Image: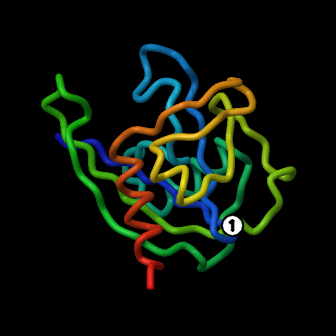
């Protein structure tokens, strides 16, 4: 059975808000930069799951009618797993300043740039160190930024 998740490319200008996941060994991608979002619950659409997750994780309400499906990305959960992950990726405008968000899940959050995506990670003020992003998240982010190339 595939695992379905809904994740957000939260855009503000030419930057994307990302979460530094907690550095706990038993979670997926511990201590890595990733997109906000999460698993779909029973009978939940990807859109509803995304709305719920963004509110739970950063207390952000998506502006009505401004969510756009960016794409779907699939891969294995990890190298030791037989489960596939289907990521429903949405582009969502971040219409409030960072100071209005409340990080309720994760170690840090930051607005990352195309250069951060190219570098495969970014410095975290809270962790006081450079932290990587998973390859799949880097690929999604690069696909997102590449759509705007001339």
For the point 79% across and 49% down, which residue is it? 101
**Front in this rendered view, residue 109 or 48:** 109
Q: Using the image, determine if residue 2 lies above or below residue 83.
A: below
- Name the quarter where the C terminus is drawn: bottom left
The colour scheme applied to this rendered structure is rainbow
Quadrant holding the N terminus: top left
Q: Nearer the viewer, residue 24 or 111?
A: 111
Residue 88 point in image, percent of width and height: 37, 59
**Going by the picture, which residue comes out furthest to the right?**
99
Residue 2 percent coordinates (x, y): 21, 43
Q: Residue lying at the far bottom in this picture: please name it.
A: 150
What is the residue that sits farthest to the top in this orientation? 25
Report whether 84 appears left or right of 73: left
57 lies left or right of 90: right
In the rendered image, which quarter is residue 41 located in? top left
Residue found at x 42% / y 15%: 26
- Above or below residue 8? Residue 40 is above
Q: Is residue 107 left or right of residue 41?
A: right
Q: Which residue is mark 1?
A: 12
Asked if 22 appears above or below 45 in the picture, the reply is above
Q: Residue at x 59, y 57 (%)?
A: 113
Drawn side of residue 29 relative to residue 99, left or right: left
Front residue of this view, candidates 22 and 49:
22
Q: Residues within 10 Å of mark 1 (few under 14, many from 20)?
A: some
| Residue occupying the point 51% across, 48% down | 35
- Callout 1: SS: strand
The answer to which image quadrant residue 57 occupies is top right
User: Where residue 131 sits: x, y (%)?
Assistant: 55, 31
């Amino acid at each position: 059975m595939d695992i379905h998740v809904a994740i957000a490319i939260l855009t503000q200008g030419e930057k994307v808000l990302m979460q530094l996941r907690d550095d706990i060994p038993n979670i997926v991608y511990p201590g890595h930069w990733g997109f906000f979002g999460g698993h779909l619950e029973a009978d939940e659409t990807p859109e509803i799951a995304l709305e719920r997750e963004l509110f739970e994780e950063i207390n952000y309400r998506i502006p009505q009618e401004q969510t756009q499906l960016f794409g779907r990305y699939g891969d294995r959960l990890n190298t030791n797993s037989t489960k596939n992950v289907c990521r429903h990726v949405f582009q969502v405008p971040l219409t409030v300043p960072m100071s209005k968000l409340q990080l309720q899940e994760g170690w840090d959050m930051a607005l990352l740039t195309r250069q951060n995506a190219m570098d495969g990670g970014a410095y975290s003020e809270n962790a006081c160190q450079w932290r990587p992003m998973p390859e799949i998240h880097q690929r999604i982010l690069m696909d997102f930024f590449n759509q705007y190339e001339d």
